[in-house]
């Protein structure tokens, strides 16, 4: 469930204000259960073996005087009434098929069956497809008569040579399939005053090692031309400050109480390892990372040339969390200004996964 309702109930509730008829296909044997869940205003019918079978069965149940049909996946339970209404409006204006879409942000590569990249696709012409998808009823009937199966109804319409209109989709209309998706969906549903925000601050400092062969570990990277920092672990002050900030925000103690020098497990541990363990503790305590910011204080190394790489490394260690990184000096003041070591200050913003 998402708080108080099943995915199906949320999906039906969002479509109900703009639908004159709601038909839900149920797996054989679950019809009565669905009817009890959804009430008398929703017509529950037995679906087919394949998705397209269920669509054909549902279309056959629609009275002839209905001109437009929306096809919706219950897994996209948070697609809004506004989105469904816009799909319908496009149909009324003369479009024969309408689908909500989102921009593709990530780089997409086509690979062969051995895992090698064939080419990089131009994401400017790619879209992520959502539901509800809307169709002129006769067009949808023809599309399903002409083909046996498809995971996307618009693809069947495309095969008929009919143009499919795209409109702007919604972030909240994502497909809910994993436990992580459920946590994300809950945050969409919670009012702002029920979403706990926690802020933490972390600080770490290490002196440069007298061992000239010790390599510098900083911000998730190895800096081979720089002398390393002393420490029980790898001495990565940026990673350690972030860990400290995250632990503080989640009320889980501090760096020392979680990764103490008395624990041999962390001797030589990398910053990435410690970030990964900290992330697991934060998630287990009921929070997700909204964003992290860290500032490195010292004369060297120059951060700017590797800033993007460092941000990527830190974000990867935190399972893709948003990370920002900056650097500064102290104009010759203090042990960092004298070139004796490095320090880092981090802040972390956490948000509750549920309430």
Image (cartoon, grey):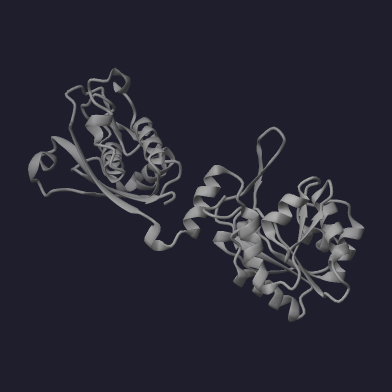
Image quadrant where residue 146 sits? bottom right
| 273 or 27, nearer to the observer | 27
Q: Residue at x 41, y 51 (%)?
A: 355
Q: Is residue 123 above or below residue 272?
A: below
User: In the current view of this chain or complex, which residue is farthest to the top?
Assistant: 264
In x, y percent, where is residue 253? 25, 37
151, above or below 229, in the image: below
The image quarter in which residue 135 lies: bottom right
Return the residue found at the far left: 333
The total of numbered circles placed on residues is 0
Residue located farthest toward the right when viewing the structure as drawn: 145
Which quarter of the figure has residue 248? Answer: top left
Q: Is residue 280 left or right of residue 114?
A: left
Q: Is residue 263 visible?
A: yes
Residue 161 visible here = no
Q: Quick check: 229 left or right of 291?
A: left
User: Which residue is painted at 13% across and 35% down in the image?
Assistant: 340
Residue shown at 55% from the left, 48% from the top: 181
Above or below, 144 relative to 344: below
Q: Where is residue 57 drawn, in percent x and y?
A: 86, 57
* Relative depth, front residue between 180 and 325: 180
From the viewer's side, name the closer residue of 142 and 71: 71
Q: Position of residue 174 (x, y in %)?
A: 59, 56
Q: Position of residue 242 (x, y in %)?
A: 29, 42
């Amino acid at each position: 469930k998402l708080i108080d309702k099943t995915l199906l109930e949320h999906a039906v509730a969002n479509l109900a204000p703009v639908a004159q008829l709601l038909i839900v296909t149920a797996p054989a044997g679950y019809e009565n259960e669905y009817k009890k869940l959804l009430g008398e205003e929703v017509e529950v019918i037995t679906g087919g073996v394949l998705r397209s079978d269920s669509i054909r069965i549902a279309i056959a149940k629609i009275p002839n005087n209905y001109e437009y049909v929306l096809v919706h996946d219950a897994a996209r339970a948070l697609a809004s009434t506004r989105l469904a209404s816009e799909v319908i409006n496009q149909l009324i204006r003369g479009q024969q098929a309408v689908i909500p879409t989102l921009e593709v942000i990530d780089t997409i590569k086509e690979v062969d069956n051995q895992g090698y990249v064939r080419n990089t696709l131009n994401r400017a012409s790619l879209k992520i497809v959502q539901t509800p998808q809307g169709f002129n009823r006769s067009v949808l009937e023809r599309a399903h008569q002409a083909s046996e199966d498809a995971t996307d109804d618009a693809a069947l319409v495309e095969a008929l040579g009919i143009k499919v209109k795209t409109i702007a989709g919604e972030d909240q209309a994502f497909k809910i399939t994993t436990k992580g998706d459920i946590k994300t969906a809950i945050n969409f549903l919670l009012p702002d005053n029920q979403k706990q925000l926690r802020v933490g601050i972390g600080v770490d400092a290490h002196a440069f090692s007298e061992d000239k062969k010790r390599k510098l570990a900083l911000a998730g990277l190895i800096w081979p031309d720089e002398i390393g920092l002393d420490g029980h672990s790898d001495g990565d002050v940026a990673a350690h400050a972030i860990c400290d900030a995250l632990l503080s925000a989640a009320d889980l103690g501090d760096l020392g109480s979680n990764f103490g020098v008395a624990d041999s497990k962390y001797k030589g541990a990398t910053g990435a390892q410690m970030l990964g363990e900290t992330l697991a503790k934060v998630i287990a305590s009921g929070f997700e990372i909204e964003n992290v910011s860290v500032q490195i204080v010292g004369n060297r190394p120059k951060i700017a040339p590797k800033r993007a790489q460092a941000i990527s490394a830190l974000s990867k260690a935190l399972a893709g969390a948003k990370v920002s990184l900056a650097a500064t000096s102290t104009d010759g003041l203090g042990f960092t200004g004298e070139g004796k070591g490095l320090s880092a200050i981090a802040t972390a913003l956490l948000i509750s996964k549920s309430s």
